[in-house]
Image (spheres, helix red, strand yellow):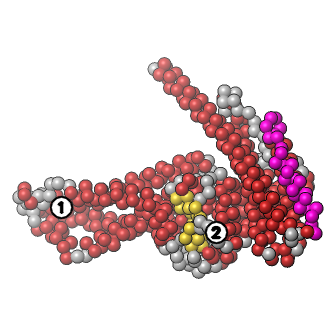
Amino acid sequence: MSSWLLLILLAAVALWLVGAYNGLVSLKNQTLNAFKQIDVQLKRRHDLIPNLVNAVKGAMDFERSTLEAVIQARNQAVQVNASGPGGVKRISQAENALSSALQRLLVVVEQYPQLKATSNVGQLQEELTSTENRIAFARQLYNDTATQYNTRQQQFPTSLVAGLARAQPADLWEITDQGERAVPQVDLSLKPKA
Amino acid sequence: MTDEASLTLFQQQEANRRRTTLLVVGFVLFFAWLGFGGDFIYWLATAHEPPAARHTVWWFGMAATALGVLLAWYAYSTGPEKVLWATGAEEVTDPATDQQRQLVNVVEEMAIAAGVPRPRIWIVSDPDPNAFATGLDPRHAHVAVTQGLLDLCSRDELQAVIAHELGHVKNLDVRLMTTLAALVGAVLLMRDGATRIFFSPGSGRIGGSGGGGGRGGRKNLGPLVAVLLVVWIVSWILAPIISQLLALAVSRKREYLADAMGAQFTRNPLALASALQKIESADAPTTHIKQGAAHLCIADPLGRRLTSHEGFLADLLATHPPMAKRITILRGMGYAALKKEGGSAA
C-alpha cells in the first residue's frame, strides 16, 4: 500500500518537473521570438525612413536640420552591434534617439497645415505613426513576455527547475532618454508590468 | 470581475477548445436523438404488426446521425466563410483609400501587440458602427469592421476596437462562436425543412398508426407512444430555441474579457470606452448583420432594448452585456492607470 503511495507521489513529482521545465522552455522561446519581432519592426523603420525623408525633402527645405537629425540617428541605429552582453541596451539607446528625432519631425509636420494637405505627407504621417506604434507594441509584447518569463523562473517552486532549463533573466527594454519619458503614450506602454 | 476573467490565457483557450468539441458532439447527439427517437416510436407503434410490417432496421437514426455529422463537419469547416458571406463583407487586399490603409496599419499594429499573425481584414458596407472577428484559430482569423466604424472612430478608437477583436481571436473565442453561428444556421435550416415535413398531409400517419395499429398490447402502448411522440416533436420545435439560448449564454461574459484583453494590448482603456460610447450612441441596427451572427459582434447589431438592462430577463435573452457597465469598467481601468502614472511621476 505505502509503496503504491510512494509511486504515485513520484509520478506526480516527475509530471510536475516535466511541466515546469517545458513551461520555462516555452516561455524562453516566446521571449526570444518577441525580441525578434522588435528587430523586424526596427528593420522596417530603418528601411522606411530614407523613402520618407525623400518624400518630404522638397516640401521641407526650411527644416533641413530636423531631417538631417533623423537621417543621422537612423544611420547610427542601423550600425549598432546587437550581439554580446548589453546588446539590448545599446539597441534601445540608438533606437530611442531615432524615436525622438522622428517625434520632432512629426511635430514639425504638424506645425505646417499646408504640408499635411499634400497627400504624400499625409501618408507619410500615417506610416510614421504606424511604424512608431508597431515598435512600441513589439517592445510591449517583449517586455510582457520577458517579465512573465523572469517571474516564472524566480518564483518558488519553479525556481528549482530554472537551472536545469538554463533559464536566465531576460533584459527588459527600458527607456533611457529622459525626453522620451515625458511622452505619456510611450511611457505608459513601456512600463514593465507590476 | 467574473470567474472567466481570472483564468489564464492558456486555460481560456483550453476551455474554448473543450466547449467547441462539446458543442459539436452535442449537436451530433441531438440529431441521433431525433433520428433514433423516431425509430423507437415507429418500432413501438409497429410492434404488433405482422413481422413484415415491423420497423426493425433503425434507418431514421442512422440517417439522422449521418446527417448530423455531415452538417457539423460542414458547419465547422466552412463556418468563417459562411459568417463573412452572410454579412456581405468584402476583403481589403489592396488598400485603396487612406482610410483603408489606416485600417490595415492598425490591424497590423494590434496583431503585433497581441502576438498573433495578422488576420485577414474585411469591411462590411454598413453605416452603423460595429465589428466582429471570426475564424477557427489565430492563424486563420478574420477581422471585419463596418464602414460606419471607420467613418466614426478616431485612430485610437479604431485601434481599441481591433484590439478587442484580437482578444477574441487570441483566446479562441472565435472558434467557439463561429462554430456556434454555423450550427445555429444549420439548425434553422433544418427547422424550415422539418416544418414542411410535419405540416404536410403525410405527417399524420405516424401518430395514426400508433393509435390504431396495435392488437393485444394496445392499451399499454398507446399512451407511451403518444408521450414519446410529443417529447420528440417538442424537441424538434425546441431545437432552434435551444441553439439560440446557447448563443446567448456563450457570448455575454466574453465581452468583458475581450474588453480587458483589448485594454491590455493597447494600454489605453479610455479609447475603447469612447469607441463603445460612439457605437452605443449610433443606435440604428446594423442591418447587414443578421441574428445568427449577432453574438460575434462587439456590440449587439440588432440594437435590442434588453442589452441595456441588467437582471434575469436580460441575462436570459441578451447577447451582450449592458454597454454602460462595460464603459464604466473600462473607465475605471483607464483612470486607475492615469492615477498610477501621476503618482509615479510626482
| Main SS category, magenta section | helix
Q: Is A109 located above or below residue B261 in the figure?
A: below
* Residue A158, position as x, y percentages in the image: 66, 33
Amino acid found under the numbered disc labelled 2: Pro
Real-space CA distance between mark 1 and mark 2, rounded to the nearest whole angstrom: 60 Å
Co-location on one chain, circles 1 and 2: yes
Q: Is residue B225 magenta?
A: no
Identify the residue shown where x is 77% and y is 58%.
Answer: A48
Please give left or right for residue A114 compared with residue B25 in the image.
right
* Residue B175, position as x, y percentages in the image: 51, 56
* Residue A151, position as x, y percentages in the image: 72, 39
Which region is colored magenta? A62-87
Decide which of tag 1 and tag 2 comes sooner along the chain.
1
Chain on which label 1 sits: B
Identify the residue shown where x is 60% and y is 77%.
Answer: B128
Q: Is A188 located above or below residue B239 in the figure?
A: above
Q: Which residue is mark 2?
A: B95
Chain on which label 2 sits: B
The residue closer to the viewer here, B245 or B262, is B262
Is residue B128 visible to the viewer in this orientation of the structure?
yes
Is residue B307 visible to the viewer in this orientation of the structure?
no
Q: Which residue is mark 1?
A: B42
* Residue B86, position as x, y percentages in the image: 47, 71
Amino acid found under the numbered disc labelled 1: Tyr
Identify the residue shown where x is 54% and y is 71%.
Answer: B89
Q: Quadrant of residue A172?
A: top right
SS for dot 2: loop
